[in-house]
Image (tube, rainbow, N blue to C red):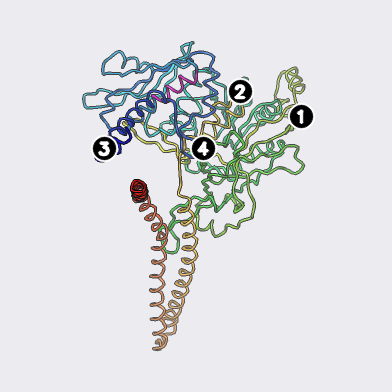
Amino acid sequence: MLDRIRNADRQVLAWATIGLAIIFFLAFNALSNTVLTSTRLDLTEDRLFTLSDGTREILETLEEPIDLRFYYSQRFDEIGPNIARHADRVRELLDEYERLSNGMVRIEEFDPQPFSTEEDLAVSDGLQGLPFDQTGARAYFGVSGTNSTDDSDAVGYLAPERSPFLEYDLTRLIANLAEPEKPVVALMSDLPLQGTQFDNFTPWLIVDGLRQFFDVKFLDKDATALPDDTEVLVIAGAHTIKDEMLYAMDQFVVNGGQVLAFADPFAETMALLGPTAGQLPPPGVGQAAIEPLLNAWGVTVARGEFVANLDDAVRVGFPNPETGQQVAVHSVAWLSLQGDRFAKNDAVTAQLQRIVVSTAGAFMSAEGATTTLEPLIFTTAISDLMSAFEVSQQPNPIALLDRFEPQDTVYNLAARVIGKVKSAFPDGPPEKILEAMEDPTAADALRAAHKNVAETDASIILVGDVDMLSNQNWAQVQDVAGEQVAIPTANNADFFINAIDNLRGSQGLVGLRGRGFSIRPFEVIEEMRSEADNKFRAKEQELLASIAKMGETIENLQREEQTTGAILTSQQQTEIDNFRQEMLDSRKELRDVQRSLREDVESLERRVRVFNIWAVPLLIAVLAILLAIVRRIRRSRYHRTVLH
């Protein structure tokens, strides 16, 4: 048999081999599609396509069945392959949820045709139908769910633009149905979190996200007590707090309550409101309002000072005051924190990739404190504390950079308070509060209930910037098929909600938030830009100083001529002409410096582009050549063996 094969026509053998390879390939694909439906190879750095431990924990601990209805109008396939591929991923993920939940999650799929009962069901489930054509017909792509007590929730539209957040959206839906009673979060803030009359009272995106998980109760600035069922207290940019409320907050913490507090040296968001906010509070007021509590918790702040940092400074365009030209400059007051700026051993920050803050404050342990600070978000040592008055009027990033002096100190922008805290009112309830109580019995009860020291460790997280909650610092709103979809550009909202969930002891979604955010900056290019900016600024200042000096010399000579009436000598006139020529040369050099700012960056981008385009074809060609050489060597060895 072997002899017959060896003697067979080589061309026939080649075609037979190709045919068998094709058959084997098709058979392997069919087998893998049937048997390996739940097998995945996730090569992304942050395992973006692998179900998180938080999702698995929620699915494994479900105590009642959850029914999910997946609506997908097949007409979407006509739009193009992108949305169809996204729909396939949704199906695969839902199948994985059903498998991991041991049948506690039950999936049904519907194709809502126009004017059908399925469309009526989709509308009643809260899905957002998207206009598909001019006839008014709508298409649907979303998921709704119900639990055994008929509570319902839905993801109205599974936008492909939010594909990195697909697992988070689905797990949140299931978590809400598994725990329909939302915990109460009391929130005190002077920020326009619920909108203003100028935006039709549209709540900030962070408020919408908060309401998905919690029963949010906003506290009026005249409030004197917390709701009885408060689980977590959030103090976000409160500039005035009544004494009664401050004491209520103090005793809430001493009795084991959880607090997320923002101590911002300057709330830029308030400044953006302009005259609508009335008299803007001066820098440091937001810190001063809760400073008695911070001191009792063993924490100090540099009131009215923000953390400036060069390593994480955001690059902005700003007109140079000397030339009027737009230049790229690092704003040391606005920071984009990434990578190793987060505590990776803490669930609140472990999955975060990027946080954006503006004029953030810092927290330090007070002298003799019985508590300790555990950093959550922090800067590099190339940092400095600068006065918030520098940015409260007309911020000038160039002037800030000139005054920036690194102190070789790492500052905590967010931290957890560890240990047993003391009361900010060691002598008991303030007499002002007791005197205002008409019932002596109630006053005696308040005295008796007072605690000076907590019996358990604190549950407090402190954050130095409240502007991180504003929309422009973490999200973009895009119009997708007529619907407004929020696309996160930073993990600010993830951190905010993670902190609240973590404080109340819920960990299911904490480890999941932040995984979907998939920004991959070109770090080498960013470093090159930073280095080029520094060189550009130094050379620019040198040339500007030279131009200004020459201009002053020419002006002095001309002024002397006008004042004395003396005619300039030929030597003086030649000197003026030389100065003018030097000014023209310096201006040309300045333009060359500005033009060369991006040369290195553009050169690297071109090399990367060429590599991406040609690397794979070249690699395949090299492998093909090597394979041909190996086959030729083997064939020659075979012929030598046969001949001998």
Q: Earlier in the sequence, mark 2 or mark 4?
A: 2
Q: Which residue is mark 1?
A: 452
Mark 4 surroundings within 10 Å by alpha-carbon count, few (fewer than 14), some (14 through 19), many (20 or more): many
Which stretch appears magenta? 91-101
* Secondary element type, mark 3: loop
Left or right placement of residue 354 versus residue 131 in this view: right
| Dominant secondary structure (helix, strand or loop) of the stretch shown in magenta | helix
The numbered disc on residue 492 is: 4
Q: Amino acid at mark 3?
A: Ala
Between marks 2 and 4 in the image, the one whose residue lies nearer the viewer:
4
Circle number at residue 8: 3
Q: Which residue is mark 2?
A: 230
Residue 532: % across, % down: 46, 60
Which of label 1 and label 3 is nearer to you? 3
* CA distance separating discs 1 and 2: 21 Å
Q: Residue furthest top?
A: 149
Q: Nearer the viewer, residue 61 or 274?
A: 61
Q: Are marks 3 and 4 in contact (CB under 8 Å)?
A: no
Q: Secondary structure at mark 4?
A: helix
